[in-house]
Amino acid sequence: MQRRLLAWAFACALFAALLPPAAAAEAGYRLDRSPHDPNDLVSLQSGARLFVNYCLNCHSAQFMRYNRLSDIGLSESQIRDNLMFAAEKVGETMKVALGTKEGKDWFGVPPPDLSVIARSRGADWLYTYLRTFYRDSRTSTGWNNAVFPNAAMPHALWRLQGERALEVAQVKDLAGHVVPEYRWSQLTPGTLGAVQYDAAVRDLVNFLVYVGEPAAQSRKRIGVIALFVLGVLFVFAYALKKNYWKDIH
């Protein structure tokens, strides 16, 4: 009986671990798949520009140094002239002048550091979150979010996306279950169209994924090489074993 219970618990844990993020979020707003590409240097550079212009005012990335942006194809002069608004040396980390106390006074909670936000929240969560802000007069900031209700953060990218409204209706699905239906409407236009805004958010998420582990691509390449070397060594080791035991077998 105990073995059966352990086997059942292991099966449930394995099933939960294999659930995709979108399925795990069905209790709330369903997450969209993030189309980011860590090999797209143009997208990463665009995301870096968006980050320093719209996010770095409040959110730091204190585990990321400016000179690491050379990994995404930028020279030190490009970094210094176009991206360094809150630092003097290219080797400094991406910190902000906003203190913890000021952030708590302004927003209720201090803005979190975004160095590993993509690893903690996931790229799909970030991609959906940045595209689901809407106007809400009941909140202190005048904004709310479908993925993260009552978020303290206002919509930093609203000039790009424009102002939107959200109506949540309760409808029945094909199985007869009552589920929420999200109905979006555009109140004021932004400087970008819907497709262009989604592309901008993809670039920003792409950059945040890179910031979470700048050496990810190098690590993967080294891993492939290491597996290849181990495969070659296995062939020689197996041949040595066959030759060593040939007189016995």
Image (spheres, rainbow, N blue to C red):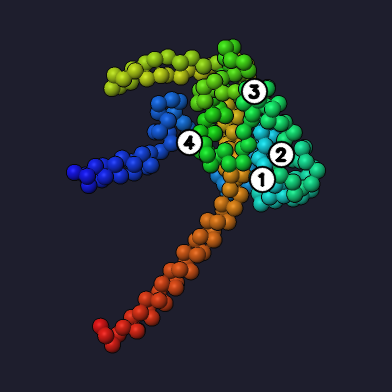
Discs 3, 4 touching: Cβ within 8 Å: no
Residue 164 in sight from this viewpoint: no
Between the C-alphas of marks 2 and 1, the distance is 9 Å
Q: Residue at x 34, y 18 (%)?
A: 178
Instruction: For the N terminus, give its image quadrant.
Output: top left
Discs 3, 1 touching: Cβ within 8 Å: no
- The amino acid type of the residue labelled 3 equals Phe
Q: Residue 95 carries which label?
A: 2
- The amino acid type of the residue labelled 4 equals Arg
Q: Residue 107 carries which label?
A: 3
Q: Where is residue 169 in the image (x, y as percent from the top left)?
A: 42, 14
Dot in front, 3 or 4: 3
Q: Residue at x 55, y 16 (%)?
A: 165
Discs 2, 1 touching: Cβ within 8 Å: no
Between the C-alphas of marks 3 and 4, the distance is 29 Å
**Secondary structure of residue under mark 4:** loop
Query: According to the image, label 4 marks what residue?
Result: 33
Q: Nearer the viewer, residue 42 or 181?
A: 181
Discs 2, 4 touching: Cβ within 8 Å: no
Query: Does label 2 or label 4 sit earlier along the sequence?
Result: 4
Query: According to the image, label 1 marks what residue?
Result: 64
**Secondary structure of residue under mark 2:** loop
Query: Does label 4 or label 1 sit earlier along the sequence?
Result: 4
Q: Which residue lies furthest to the front in this view?
A: 2
Identify whether 244 is placed above or below 45: below
Q: Which of 117 and 43 is in front in this view?
A: 117
